[in-house]
Image (tube, rainbow, N blue to C red):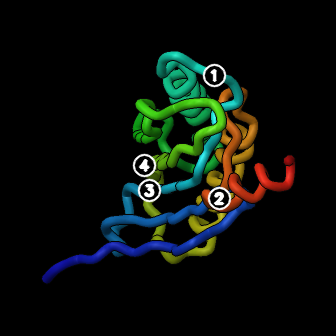
Amino acid sequence: MKVRGSKINNIKSKNHKTVIGTVHKDNPKCIYLKNTSWLLPVDEYIDNYPINKLNKEIKGWLHHNINKYGFSDRLYIVDLDIRESGLKSGKPSYCDCEITVYQKEVLPFNSTVLQKKLTQLNSDFIENCLDNSKYFKFYQNKTDIINEKKDSQ
């Protein structure tokens, strides 16, 4: 019998699209939060310093805050995917940030308690790590960047 995962589709914030899910819906020990968006660098950069710095800030924030949401502060994975080869000021880049967290006390994926914890974790993560980034400005769609550029001209 094949076990399938489960997910909550398209939780949208102002500048990000999020999918929260698990690969094993009956025993969801680990859960992923996948945030996708478009970004513009705030300044001109020559190397991948801002990507590494953002990745380090995300991991640091998780390490210090993840316990209060009921997830392990020893087991979590951060996969920040930003195409650094074309990272230039004024040029949009796609960003995919997937965080995998592990429950301390395994709750069913469809439980309201777990859903509230995940939603709050994701909301706080976006607010503290992505939207307050010193290096990038995030947008939900590439067209949002284009429209903002047209409005500023």
Q: CA distance from mark 4 to mark 3?
A: 4 Å
Q: Counting other residues with Cα less than 10 Å from the Cα at mark 2, is it few (<14), some (14-19), or many (20 or more)?
A: some
Q: If you read the primary sequence from the N terminus, does the residue marked by circle 4 or circle 3 appear first?
A: 3
- Could you say which disc has been placed on residue 44 in the image? 1
Instruction: Give above or below for 148 relative to 66.
Output: below
Disc 4, SS: strand
Residue at image mark 4: 100
53 vs 82, nearest the viewer = 82
Disc 4 and disc 3 in contact, CB within 8 angstroms: yes
Residue at image mark 3: 32
Disc 2 and disc 3 in contact, CB within 8 angstroms: no
Q: CA distance from mark 2 to mark 3?
A: 19 Å
In the rendered image, the quadrant that contains the N terminus is bottom left
Residue 99, image x and y in percent? 47, 47
Q: If you read the primary sequence from the N terminus, does the residue marked by circle 3 or circle 1 appear first?
A: 3
Residue 131, image x and y in percent? 73, 42
Q: For this view, does 123 lie left or right of residue 55?
A: right
Q: CA distance from mark 2 to mark 1?
A: 22 Å
Residue at image mark 2: 140
Q: CA distance from mark 1 to mark 4?
A: 31 Å
Name the residue furthest front: 153
139 vs 72, nearest the viewer = 139
What kind of residue is marked 1?
Glu
Q: If you read the primary sequence from the N terminus, does the residue marked by circle 2 or circle 4 appear first?
A: 4
Q: Counting other residues with Cα less than 10 Å from the Cα at mark 1, is it few (<14), some (14-19), or many (20 or more)?
A: few
Q: For this view, does 123 lie left or right of residue 95?
A: right
What kind of residue is marked 4?
Thr
Foreground label between 1 and 4: 1
| Residue 88 appearing in the image | yes
Q: CA distance from mark 3 to mark 1?
A: 32 Å
Q: Quadrant of residue 85?
A: top left
